[in-house]
Image (cartoon, helix red, strand yellow):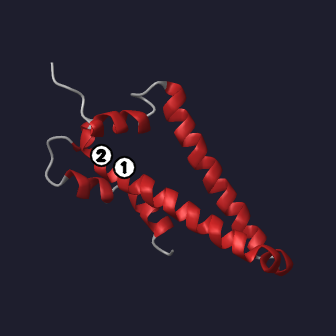
Amino acid sequence: MSEITQRRRVYNLLDESVTAPSIGRLINIILIVLITANVIAVALETVESIHQQFEVHFAVFEAFSVFIFTAEYLVRLWVCVEDKRYQGVSWPRLRYAMSAMAIIDLLAILPF
């Protein structure tokens, strides 16, 4: 029996259908909360008085969020070869990167 690789372990953590439901679900909930917080922050930044008062906080939060989303994108790009949809195909990471969800993720972090 082959040893489970570190990449496979990380893939299992990110995939709700493979991992213990609570871990995969928790990761997704954290990401959804972070996305929601970013939407709220962008809306609050449109109010000039709030923007002026919390400008530095908004900038730090944005940088933190971009870091998390970039790390998630890169980790998913690394582990995608463990996904059955990308096994046995040429250029699996490129195929993943061209998927709808990966493109949406990339578009979310590129403007930063």
- In the displayed structure image, the side of residue 29 where residue 19 appears, left or right: left
Count of numbered circles on the image? 2
Q: Amino acid at mark 1?
A: Arg
Q: Residue at x 29, y 35 (%)?
A: 8
Q: Residue at x 67, y 54 (%)?
A: 36
Name the residue nearer the viewer: 35 or 88: 35
| Residue at the right extreme, as displayed | 49
Q: Is residue 36 above or below residue 66?
A: above
Numbered disc 1: secondary structure: helix
* For the residues bearing labels 2 and 1, Cβ distance under 8 angstroms: yes
Q: Give x and y (percent) for residue 63.
A: 57, 68
Q: Locate residue 79: give its quadrant.
A: top left
> Residue visible at 24% across and 58% down?
94
Image coords of residue 72 (percent x, y)? 44, 52
Judging depth in this view, the residue of 96 and 64 nearest the camera is: 64
Question: Residue 13 vs residue 63: left or right?
Answer: left
Task: Identify residue type, mark 2.
Answer: Cys
Around disc 2, counting alpha carbons within 10 Å, would you say few (fewer than 14), some (14 to 19), or many (20 or more)? many
Check residue 80 in the rendering and tell me which mark sits there, or answer none.
2
Residue located at (15% from left, 47% from top): 89
* Residue annotated with mark 1: 76
**Helix, strand or loop at disc 2?**
helix
Horizontally, residue 41 falls left or right of residue 69, namely right
Q: Residues within 10 Å of mark 1 (few under 14, many from 20)?
A: many
Q: What is the distance, in whole Å, between disc 2 and disc 1 at their CAs?
A: 6 Å
Q: Quadrant of the N terminus?
A: top left
Q: Which mark is residue 100?
A: none
Residue 99 vertical position relative to residue 59 in the rendered view, above or below: above
Q: Residue furthest top?
A: 1
Residue 66: horizontal and vertical position, in percent? Answer: 52, 64
Q: Nearer the viewer, residue 18 or 98?
A: 18
